[in-house]
Image (spheres, rainbow, N blue to C red):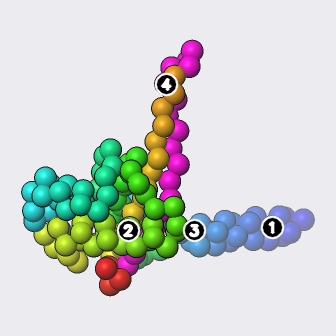
Amino acid sequence: MKKNLFLHNGLLSFLIVLLLTQCKYTTTSQKQAILNIPSDSLSYQLGRIIVCKHIDITGKDIKAGGQISTELDISMINSKDLPSDRNNQNELAKKIATIIKNALQNKNDFDSYKVFFITETKSENAMGTITKKNYISFDFKKVEI
């Protein structure tokens, strides 16, 4: 009886160790996007192709499965006159990513660029303010732009 219990516990321990060693963890940390032009110059360049309430640019280091990648997220909040056609939206997103990439001090800092078109609405009720966000996104590898 003890032998079967030992085999059972040994097998269980082996399975737990196997499971833990096969898990892949992803960690994300911020990476600063350093511009080589003043931010008002960048705003002017972007404003020539799209008008929006606010622009957020966030760099990330992503470590997953022993691999490190970098991503630059570009959020265009409440854009005006956004094309309704997905292909035209993609073209616009690519232009935005290209402008941002060209404004970076080091154009090789990021492996990929993700452009988000975010629609943000706020409404009031008895409980306070409710913010609702909808978005579409487009991804580009640095070699594509």
Which badge, 4 or 3, comes first in the chain's sequence? 3
Query: Residue at label 1?
Result: 8
Which of labels 1 and 4 is toward the front?
Answer: 4
Q: Name the amino acid type tagged 3.
A: Cys
Residue drawn at x 19%, y 62% as measured from the top left: 45
Q: Name the amino acid type tagged 4.
A: Thr
Q: How far apart are marks 1 and 3 (CA)?
A: 23 Å
- Name above or below for residue 116 compared with residue 88: above
Q: Nearer the viewer, residue 137 or 43?
A: 43
The C terminus lies in which quarter of the figure?
Answer: bottom left
Q: Is mark 1 on a helix, strand or loop?
A: helix
Q: How far apart are marks 2 and 3 (CA)?
A: 38 Å
Q: Which of 48 and 25 is in front in this view?
A: 48
Query: Residue at label 2?
Result: 92
Q: Name the amino acid type tagged 1.
A: His
Residue 129's disc is: 4
Instruction: Determine if the magenta segment contains residue 104.
Output: no
Q: In the rendering, at what x and y percent does residue 97 appear?
A: 31, 69
Q: Distance between the residues labelled 4 and 3?
A: 40 Å
**Magenta residues, start to end:** 125-141
